[in-house]
Image (spheres, rainbow, N blue to C red):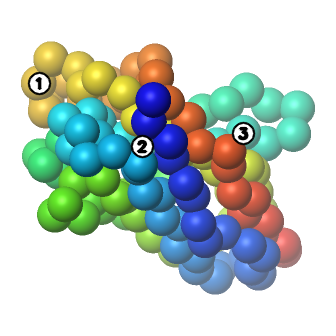
Amino acid sequence: QVQLVESGGGSVQAGGALSLSCTASKDTTIYLCMGWFRQAPGKEREEVASIYRSALSSHYADSVKGRFTISRDNAGNTIHLQMNSLQPEDTAMYYCAAGPCPGTWFDLERDGLKNPDYWGRGTQVTVSS
């Protein structure tokens, strides 16, 4: 069983920046794809960004492209999400996730991370106007 532990998050005014991190409990996570999902009250959970093993590729939701950056440490079991130019609509609970990678790095770049097997408990991000 892989455990994912998120850190970071918090409250910021619109236009500000926050950074999230997620560390997996097992080194075998280096073989998995990892990503960030978010869920706002009354809305469905959506994928924000994901990254292939060895950081070969990444995928972003249209709503965060150009503002958010996902990265992965060389050790492979920690990912980060740098969030810039935050807006009130970015307010949500952010969850770290991990799961089998799609066929190729291109598949993740195009489609994102589908059906993760492992989830963190989440960290709250609140952006005020």
Residue 76: which quarter of the image? Answer: bottom left
* Residue type at numbered disc 2: Gly
Mark 1 Cα within 10 Å, few/some/many (few <14, many 20+)? few
**In this rendering, would 59 be left or right of 56?**
right
Mark 3 Cα within 10 Å, few/some/many (few <14, many 20+)? some
Residue 126 appears in the figure: yes
Mark identifier at residue 39: 3
* x, y percent for residue 103: 15, 17
Report how far apart the C-alphas of labels 3 and 2 lie in the structure. 14 Å
The secondary element bearing badge 2 is classed as strand
Who is closer to the viewer here, 59 or 52? 52
* x, y percent for residue 47: 52, 36
- Give the quarter of the figure containing the C terminus: bottom right
Question: Which residue in the protein does label 1 denote?
Answer: 104
Question: Which residue in the protein does label 2 denote?
Answer: 35
Who is closer to the viewer here, 105 or 33? 33
Residue at position x 19%, y 35% in the image: 31
Report how far apart the C-alphas of labels 1 and 3 lie in the structure. 27 Å
Mark 2 Cα within 10 Å, few/some/many (few <14, many 20+)? many
The secondary element bearing badge 3 is classed as strand
* Residue type at numbered disc 1: Thr
